[in-house]
Amino acid sequence: MDPAILLIQCLNAVQYGLLLFLVASGLTLIFGIMGIINLAHGSFYMIGAYMAFALQPLVAQYLGGGFVITVLVCVVLATVLGYFLEWAFYSYLYTREHLQQVLMTYGLILVFEELRSIIVGNDVHGVPVPSWLNGSVALGDVMTYPVYRLFISAVCILIALLMFWVLNRTRLGMMIRAGASNREMINSLGIDINRLFRIVFAIGVALAALAGAIAAPVSSVYPGMGNAVLIICFVVVVIGGIGSIKGAFLAAMLVGFVDTFGQVFFPAAAGVMVYLLMAAILLFKPEGLFKH
Amino acid sequence: MRFILRAVLLLVLLALVLSLPSFASSYYLGLVIKIMIYALFALSLQLLVGCTGLVSLGHSAFFGIAAYFVTLLSPESGAGNMLWLLPGAMLAAMGYAVVTGALALRTKGIYFIMVTLAFAQMAYYVFHDTALGGGTDGIYLYFRPEIRLGDWVVLNIDNQFVFYVFTLACLLLTWAFLALLMRSRFGAALTGIRVNEQRMRAAGFSTFKYKLIAYVIGCGLAGVAGFLYAAKDGYVNPELLAWEQSGLVLLMVILGGMGRLWGAVLGAVALTLLQELFQSHALFGEFASRWHLTFGLAIIALVAVLPQGLAGLPEQLRNRRRSKSISPASAQ
């Protein structure tokens, strides 16, 4: 294989993996700390992407425009939405069985999808790449690589570093890590677990929406985009081990590479590859790579 | 007294179901057939989820594999013979269940949910991405299979009424089989595994074997539902194996009530009717085309008020009444 093509595929794999990490990290935190199976997490990705599409004209009109501002508005709105949803729906699920959570969050998916269809419609929409990121860099003699994809990777790496810093160096991170390993204990140590849950949930929603918003110019926005990403993110979370951010990162990169190169080498079996990987890993490590 | 009441209730229900074709239009007959197929499908999952404690989110794979089996192996120019197509469809589903079940049962809890999902997705992509079953377009089954001995056609299910009775018979047989199974020693062992697997192992049961057999039986019965579904619509596509389908049938089991066989049937009836209700233009007018919204909200509301599912409702009400009559202050 031509080294330039190989490099391009590697860059694609890294970018896809990093994007998956953004969504999956929120999912694994919600899973690990709050103990909630959140099927609606893919919807937050979808909501982020659709907000990036729908808010662009509004932001241009009232805030002077700009892609970065649009994304920031999306993230802020998603945080508010997450805070609200935790209060309105998810806070009732902590004492319920896992299956009840599956049921209710499945209901939420249906509601979100239909609201999306009512507000924006069922068409596929493109989201323009911002003009200052619209170029491409030359790789080798004939190949080029779009700058915007590099931008996505850069943003994801930045967020990942920020997250590692918050988790490992701040008081909030300490509480989150403690919550992931023993929920009852930190509650009895006087930490307001309900507030912590609400914050973690809002962060998770914001991360998923951010991933959706920055992915929108590449993937365009379409109905059902949330469900597609949801299942693959569950795969990432389970491979990595529930509640482990480090595991989610590693698993996301693994899935990114397997999926991208699966499509290159075995186009007929591309869809199966990721699940094969997951089945293989779980057979040797039944609780994921990094069990909490 | 209670036994007589139950028997009378069952007889009335049976009479109603049997006399239904005489007064229902063909549309409603079709709806009832669909409900019965889903009830069978949900029953087969109840054996895993409610009775053995194996929560599978990949049950649609077995449903779809059986449906594809019938459609692919039926001749194009005439009806296939059910005498080998139905067992064949079940065996195809069970074959996939043996392989994937033996691997998936090494994991537990949420990991088991995800591994079953992964195996179902694998089957989904095989039908979705390869030309085997016509890809995303799906394929048609032109003739419903019939029971044939030599040249003698014993049963032809082309007629909707006959198909209705046939489906009903399949459902009742499955129900009876599972009820007997759960009363047997084997069923008691499954209940034991659900309640406390560690203890069952300590008592000398090879729990893995029991779980695998239960898994294979449940998947084979899902194959019966898949067979009926293909025969009903005469059309299969990869969406039959999609995770949304697994999710839907799992919802039926949870909503109906876990652990009770009739809970699965109740859940299938309730969920299918709810979908139908919210799609009705007469009741919801313009909003009928937005039925996902109302359906989703209804699911959320049902979770909020029915923590034990529909089958647990009488118990829930009884408990509430009791706690009220004992001490109104301590009741929440």
Image (spheres, coloured by chain):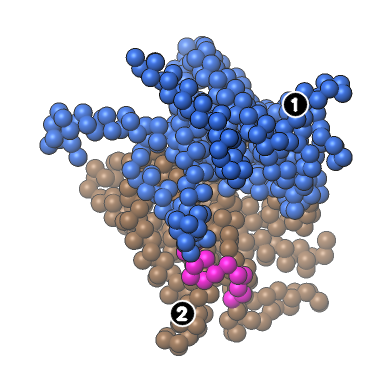
B210 lies left or right of A110: right
Quick one: B296 or A247, which is closer to the camera? B296
| Range of residues picked out in magenta | A114-127
- Tell me, yes or no, whether the highlighted magenta stretch contains residue A115: yes
Q: Which chain is brown?
A: A
Q: Secondary structure at mark 2?
A: helix
Chain letter for the blue colouring in the rendering: B
Say if labels 2 and 1 share a chain: no
Q: Could one spot residue A169 in this view of the protein?
A: no
Q: Which residue is mark 1?
A: B155
B139 horizontally vs B124: left or right:
right
The disc labelled 2 sits on which kind of residue? Ile
Please give the residue where the numbered disc 2 appears in the rendered image.
Answer: A69
**A290 vs A159: above or below:** above
Q: Quadrant of the C terminus of chain A?
A: top left
Q: Residue furthest front?
A: B23
> Residue B64 — which label?
none
As shown in the figure, which amino acid type bears the numbered disc 1? Leu
Please name the residue shown 79% across and 49% down the image: B134
Image marks 2 and 1: residues in contact by CB distance under 8 Å: no
Residue at 47 percent across and 40 percent down: it is B270
Image position, residue A274 (x, y; %) = 66, 48
How packed is label 2: few (under 14 Cα within 10 Å), some, or many (20 or more)? some
Crowding near the residue tagged with mark 1, few <14, some 14–19, many ≥20 C-alpha atoms within 10 Å: some
In the image, residue A4 sits, relative to residue B154, either above or below, namely: below
Q: Position of residue B204 (x, y in %)?
A: 51, 11
Say which residue appears at 45% left-offset and 56% top-offset.
B283
Q: Residue at x 36, y 51 (%)?
A: A90
Q: Quadrant of residue A134?
A: bottom right
Queried whether the magenta region covers residue A124, the answer comes back as yes
Q: Quadrant of the N terminus of chain A?
A: bottom right
